[in-house]
Image (cartoon, coloured by chain):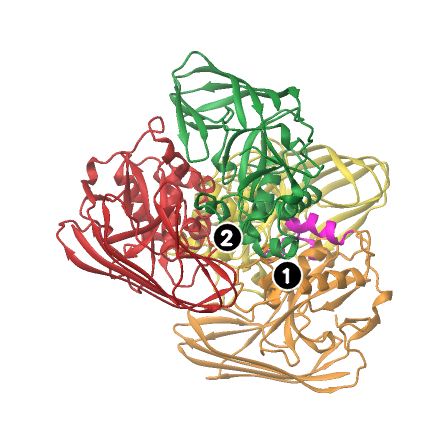
Chain colours: A green, B red, C yellow, D orange
C-alpha cells in the first residue's frame, strides 16, 4: 500500500456571479481510498457534489458572488493498486468487451483515432497483442515527442502533436490514447495528482483496457504509475478540466502538490515488468 | 400518438471472422414505445445485446464467420412526444444542470465547440435565452449550408462545415450542436429513422437540453420532429455509427425505411411554435 | 510627399556557423524612394544582396560565426503614393489580368482561399465590385476579430482566424487576403514598417489588385495607408519573414521604429474615400 | 534523346461567358524542346498566351460564350535530360542558394513544411546530404502511402496525407515536397504528362534543387523520370491547375495521353543510380 498526501490551492478574482465546476478532488474507488479529505473556500460557500458519468467522476459545484476566492483541497489517499505481471496481461477481443468500455474506442475531440488509424496500424499493428503493445505505444510517444512547456494550447490535438512532435503531459496522453484506439484498444484520459511532479501541477496520463481492467500508463515517464492519484477520467482532457467556469473569473494563483507519505509496495510501476491498475 | 413502421436491411460480404456492433434498433423510452420488433440474420446467428452508456443506447453484437450476411430489422414504434409551447421553454443555468448533462457541454470529435465558441457567442450570444435561441441556431445552419451528398466524409467536423458551407444531415447536426455548446447549451447527436426521408437512409439530427428536458431539432428540415425515431444518442456521430466492424466485411447493400402508420397529433413539430421532446 | 525614418535593431546569440537571410530593408519602387540607408553589423560582416522574385524583394544574406551579433538598419524613405478616388477604382476581369498577377489568386499556406471561397462568396459576393468591396472585406475583418497578442502563432492560418476570431496583424492580413482571393480579387501580403505603430514592431498588411494597380489596406487600422513602408511582399507571411536562419542562433533583442519626418499629403489614407497605392 | 507524343482533349459545357486559363501545353526549356504543337478549339476562339512567373509557365487564356467547347492539345516533344551519377549530386548550402530558389523553401498551401519540419528532421535529418537523401524521402513516401483513387480531394494537404497514409499522385508529390523543405532542400511541384501512365491522366511529380539544378522525382513510381513532360511548375498543385475557370462551365470529358515515339537514352531514370534533370 502507498499513502500519498495530495492537495491544490486555487485563487480566482471573481468579477460577477459565476458558477464553478471543480474537478480537483481524488476519486474514490476500491483501490484508491480516501483517508481524510477537506475542501475549503474563502469566503465560505455552499457546495454541491455532482456525480458525472459512470466512471465515478465527482465534481464540486459552487456559485460565487464577486470576490477574491480561495479554494483549498487536501486529502490523504491510500493506493492499493492491482499489480500484475505485464507479460500475462492480454488484450480483449471486440467480441467480449463490456458495453461501457466501447465508447473508449471512439475518436474524441483531442484524440482523433479515425485520422490516425492507418498510422497506428502501420506502426503498431504487427506487434504482439497485450500489455506490451500499449507499452510500445507509450514508449514510442515518449521517444518521439519533446516535452516543451508552452508548445501547445487548449485546442491542440493528437494529430497536431503527431506532426509537430512537441507537447506537454496532456498531449502525450492524447497521442497515446489515439494510437491505442487506432489499433482497437479502448483507452481513456486520466487527470490526477502525481508524486513529486516537476514542475508541480495537475498531471495528465492514460489508461488502456486490457484483460477486463484499466491499466495505467504515463507516456511522459515523469511519474511512477504506482504513485498516480486519479481525480477523474474521460474520453480526453475535455472531460476533466480542473475548473469549468460560467460567468467571469480570472485564475490568479494555482499550486498543486502530491507527496509520498509511505510506500510498502515493491513495484516502481514503470519499467520493471509490472502492470498497474487502480480501476 | 404517432405510430411509425421503421426498418432497415443490410447485407455484408464477410471475409473472415468479424465482430459487428449494430446500432439499428429503435431506443425504448417512456415516450418512444416499441410495439413489435424483429431482428433477423441470414445465416442465423447468436446475438448479444449491449447496453452502452446511460442514455439507453442498445447495440446488438454478433460474431460472424465468412459468409454473405443479411440483416433485417423491423419495428412498429409508438411516439408519444411531449409537445410544449416553444415560447415557454427556457434555458437552464449552469448552476442547476444535472451532472449527467454536463458532458454534453464539452467539445467532441466532430463538434469542436472550443474552436467555434467565439463565433457562436458573436452570432447568437445576444439572443433571448431559451428554445427560440436553439431554433435560431438550427435555422442559421439550415440557411447557410447547402445540402450536397458526397461533399463531406467520415472525418468532416463542424469547423470544416462552418467554413465550407456544405454537408449532409450529420454535418448539419454537428454544426448546430457545436454552436449550442458554444453558447453554453448542452446538445447531443441523435441517429435515427425519419418518416419519408428522401433519399431514404438513416438520419442524423440533434437534441438540446432546455428546461430539464431534451428537445428535438432537425437543422436539415428534411423531417418533422414529431416523426423522428431515435436509434441512439451520443456526443456526435462517432458514438452512434450504425455498424462498427472488427474484422473484414464489406457492405454490399443498405436500405432503410420509415413510414407513418397513424398520426393523431396536431403538431407538425416544425415551424408551428411547438417544442417536441421524446427524452 | 511623405518622408519617414525607419529602422530596426536585432541582436542574436549565434551558437554555430549560421546563415541569415534578412528581410528588413525598405523596398525601392518608383513610389517608395530610399533617400539614405545603412545596414551595419557588429562584428563586421560581408553581406550579399539577394533579389527574390519579380516584386523587388531584397534580402541580405550573411554567414556568421559564433558570436553576439548586432544588426542595425536605418533608412530615410520618401513615399509618393498614388492616391485615387476610391469610388473610381474598379475590379479587373479575369480575362484581362496580367499573367504575373494570377498567382495571387491561388490559395497559399496561410490564406486558404479554397476553403473560404463559399463563405467569401456568401458574405461579399453580392457587393458592388471595386475598391469598396475590398474595403468592405477589410472592415469586416477589423470588426469581427479582436486584436490579442499571443492568441496565434507562426502556424495560424486564415481559416483558423475566421473560426477563433482573434489574432494579430499578420492574421488580420491573412484573413483579408483569403477573402479577397475567394471572390476573385488578387491579393498579397506586405511586411513593412508603420509610423508610430503601438507596440512598435514590424507590421503586416495587404494589397489588393484593382484596376491594374496594387492598393494598400490595413485591416487592423493601426496605421494610415499613406504611412506604410514596404519591406517585401509575397503570397503570405511565409514569404517575408524578417529573418530566416539556417544554423543555430537565438534572437535576444528586437526593436523597430518608424517616425514621420514630414508629410505634405492631404490624405489620411484611411476612411476618407481615398485609395492609396505605392506599387 | 527521347521523343514523346503528348496530348489532351477536354470538353466543357459552358453556361455563361467564362474565362478559362488553360495549363495543358508542354513547357519549352533547353532540355525540353517542342518539335510540333497544336492547340485547337471548337468552336474557334481567340487565344492569349500568358507567361506566369519566372519558371516559364505558359497559360492559354480564352473567353468563351455559352456553347459546347472542345479543346484539343497535341505536341511532339524532345527530351534531352541531363543525366548525372546520383552519387555525385550534393545539396547546396543555404549560404549559396540563388535568390530565385529561396521561395521553394517556404511552406505553401498543400505543403506545410512548417508543420512537418520536426518530423522531417527526425526521420531524414541524419541521412547523408545529397541526391540520396531526396531519394530516401521519395522512397519513404512511396512505401508509406497507399495509392487510392478518390481518397483525397482538392483541399487535401501534405499533413493530411502524412496522417491518413493514402492519396494520389499530387498527394505523393506534396508530401515529398514538404519533407524536402522540412530538411532545408528547395522543392517544387510539377504538373505534366507521363508516358503510359495508368490510368491515363495528367500527372503530378516533383523536383528538388540540388547542386544548382532541379532534379526530378516521382514518388508514385508510376513513370520513369526520363519520360516526364513538364507542363508547369509551382509551389504546389495550387499553382498549376490544368484549368482555372471564371464563370460557369462544367467539364464533361477529359482524355490525356503520352506515348513514347523513340528513346535513345540508356537511363531508366528510376532506380539505376542516375539523377535526371530537365530544368
Q: Are marks 2 and 1 on the same chain?
A: no
Q: Residue at x 56, y 44 (%)?
A: A211
Letter of the chain that mark 2 sits on in the rendering: A
Q: Which class describes the residues within 10 Å of circle 1: few (<14), some (14-19), or many (20+)?
A: many
* Position of residue B254 measured from the top left corner of the image (x, y, whole percent): 37, 66
> Does C104 lie within the magenta span?
no
Q: Nearer the viewer, mark 2 or mark 1?
A: 2
Question: Position of B82 compared to D233: left or right?
Answer: left
Which element carries disc 1, helix, strand or loop?
helix
Residue C79 shows in the view: no
* Position of residue A244 measured from the top left corner of the image (x, y, whole percent): 45, 29
Residue D69 shows in the view: yes
* Position of residue B216 measured from the top left corner of the image (x, y, whole percent): 28, 46
Choose between C139 and A200: the one closer to the eye.
Answer: A200
Q: Give the quadrant of the C terminus of chain B.
A: top left
Tell me how far mark 2 sits from mark 1, CA to CA: 37 Å
Location of mark 2 (residue): A94
Amino acid at each position: 500500500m502507498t499513502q500519498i498526501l495530495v492537495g491544490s490551492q486555487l485563487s480566482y478574482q471573481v468579477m460577477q456571479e459565476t458558477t464553478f465546476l471543480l474537478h480537483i478532488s481524488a476519486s474514490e474507488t476500491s483501490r484508491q481510498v480516501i483517508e481524510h479529505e477537506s475542501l475549503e473556500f474563502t469566503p465560505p460557500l455552499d457546495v454541491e457534489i455532482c456525480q458525472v458519468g459512470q466512471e465515478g467522476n465527482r465534481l464540486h459545484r459552487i456559485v460565487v458572488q464577486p470576490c477574491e476566492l480561495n479554494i483549498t483541497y487536501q486529502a490523504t489517499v491510500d493506493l492499493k493498486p492491482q499489480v500484475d505481471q505485464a507479460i500475462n496481461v492480454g488484450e480483449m477481443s471486440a467480441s467480449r468487451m463490456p458495453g461501457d468500455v466501447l465508447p473508449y474506442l471512439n475518436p474524441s475531440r483531442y484524440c482523433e483515432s479515425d485520422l490516425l488509424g492507418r498510422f497506428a496500424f502501420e506502426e503498431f499493428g504487427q506487434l504482439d497483442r497485450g500489455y506490451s503493445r500499449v507499452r510500445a505505444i507509450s514508449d514510442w510517444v515518449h521517444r518521439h515527442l519533446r516535452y516543451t512547456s508552452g508548445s501547445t494550447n487548449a485546442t491542440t490535438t493528437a494529430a497536431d502533436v503527431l506532426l509537430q512532435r512537441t507537447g506537454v503531459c496532456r498531449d502525450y496522453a492524447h497521442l497515446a490514447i489515439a494510437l491505442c484506439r487506432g489499433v482497437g484498444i479502448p483507452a481513456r484520459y486520466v487527470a490526477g495528482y502525481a508524486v513529486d511532479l516537476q514542475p508541480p501541477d495537475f498531471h495528465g496520463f492514460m489508461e488502456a483496457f486490457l484483460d477486463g481492467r484499466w491499466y495505467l500508463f504515463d507516456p511522459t515517464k515523469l511519474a511512477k504509475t504506482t504513485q498516480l492519484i486519479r481525480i477523474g477520467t474521460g474520453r480526453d482532457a475535455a472531460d476533466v478540466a480542473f475548473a469549468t467556469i460560467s460567468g467571469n473569473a480570472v485564475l490568479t494563483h494555482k499550486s498543486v502538490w502530491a507527496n509520498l507519505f509511505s510506500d510498502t509496495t515493491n513495484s516502481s510501476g514503470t519499467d520493471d515488468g509490472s502492470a498497474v491498475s487502480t480501476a
